[in-house]
Image (cartoon, grey):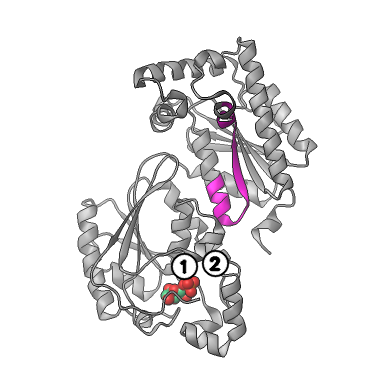
Amino acid sequence: MTVHDFLPRPLALVMVGKPARGKSYTARKLSRYLSWTGYRARVFNVGSYRRHLLGPGQDHSFFDPRNEEGLKARQRMAEAAMDDLVRWTRDGGEVAIYDATNSTRSRRAWVAEELGRHGIDCVFVELFTEDQSIIDANIRQTKLSSPDYRTYDPDQALKDFRTRVAHYESVYEPLTDESLSFIRVLDAGRSLYANRLDGYLPTALAQFLLNLHLGKRSLYLSRHGESLYNVEGRIGGDSALSPRGEAYAVSLDQFLRNALPTDDVRLWTSTLRRTQQTARHLPWKSTAWRPLDEIEAGVCNNLTYQEIAERMPDEYAARKADKLRYRYPRGESYEDVISRVTPVILELERQTGPVVIIAHQAILRALYAYFHGEAATAVPHLSIPLHTVIQLTPTAYGCDEVRTALPPNPKAHFTAGI
Ligand code: F6P
């Protein structure tokens, strides 16, 4: 059973909302989350089609509902994006995100009919808010840097954008049609209303949407300090830190106290000794999470990669051939790890302050991949070295990263493995 079995037909998530409600941000977040969990996902942003076909820089009058030419051009862009979306699902695309305002009943009826005609399931996702602080945060973080306003000064851009919003407001019809399948997210996750959601994926996505916010915060990832098993090149187990690993715990404490001079820090470790020993000097209360425990190597636990290659050459070769899907006998695969850490991702999304996570190579690969929008296939191959702090700061459309290697250098050992 893989994630694909949860999805008998392609699915389209159709964004709905006035401008500056966070639709494009949310569409990208959904797409990244879905790719990370293993689905073939892609955003079809109607605004990009407009910019591509007409060039950027239409002023607000283009969006005025009384502008007949503008209306026709916008319908053409919506159709071009829809054609590509349908073609993409025929080529194996699984979850398409159709990103536009889709702000009137008639537009939504057209979208639903087009998708239905091509055998694509459809869930509308409306982001609704009149909270000016949320709208202003969206405008600041996304709109004013949009290619539409490259040639405008900031005041002029803001004025034009506000008039564009007013045009949409004059025709906007909230999503109330109970015959449709939809998720309405109110005030950036303060509450959520779900209607006719069918199956695992749409309900899982509703849960994901509840936890999103646009606030800025940093996340600090570190593997545990070098362990006795690392020195011997053994995998799994529950060994203690080596003397170098102990020294890293001290360096990490100095580094993080300096970087985070505040009491308001969440500190999460796994339940294994080596992460807890690495965290022990840090000043914040730590929480040990089982979902952060290292990948379970089953029958290969406590062995070196060389021993696995000698004693179980078929297992060794199978893992090398498909490291994402390979499951250790009586253990886990990277796919299993990704689904196991999903609750951690939801918890991380809802945090508003800094979080420090001290965990393990496979686990941090999975978390890191999520924040960088890497697909599941990339996860097993990412580089997460020992004795290195990775600071990630999610931004509106990506993630900034700073890596800091701290002393002492770990001994060169056999972690590259299979
Ligand atoms: O070698 C350290 C370690 O954390 C092992 O416990 C774990 O099995 C391994 O890394 C995961 O890395 P890979 O998936 O590359 O074998």
Badge 2: residue crowd in 10 Å (few <14, some 14–19, many ≥20): many
- Judge whether residue 385 can be spotted in this image: yes
Residue at coordinates 54% horizontally, 67% vertically from top-left? 334
> For disc 2, does the CB lie below 8 Å from ligand 1?
yes
Using the image as rendered, state which of residue 392 and residue 55 is in the foreground. Answer: 55
Residue under the image location 72 percent in, 39 percent down: 86
Q: Quadrant of the N terminus?
A: bottom right
Residue lying at the far right of the rendered structure: 117
Tell me residue 122's x, y (percent).
Answer: 70, 39
Disc number placed over residue 215 in the picture, else none: none
Residue range (magenta): 31-50
The structure residue drawn at horizontal position 55% and vertical position 58%, both measured from the top left corner, is 376
Residue that numbered label 1 is attached to:
362
Residue at coordinates 64% horizontally, 42% vertically from top-left? 96
Q: Which image quadrant shows ligand 1?
A: bottom left
Relative horizontal placement of residue 145, taking residue 118 as reference (left or right): left
Please check the rendered image and state whether residue 331 is part of the magenta-colored stretch, yes or no.
Answer: no
Q: Residue furthest bottom?
A: 311
Identify the mark nearer the N-term, 1 or 2. 2
Q: Could you tell me residue 373's position as x and y percent?
A: 49, 50
Q: Are marks 1 and 2 in contact (CB under 8 Å)?
A: yes
389 w.r.t. 203: above or below: below
Asked whether 33 falls inside the magenta stretch, the response is yes
Residue 334's mark? Answer: 2
Residue type at mark 1 is: Ala
Q: Using the rendered image of the protein, determine whether residue 179 is visible from the camera's viewpoint.
A: no
Instruction: State yes or no: Cβ of the residue under disc 1 lies below 8 Å from any atom of ligand 1.
Output: yes
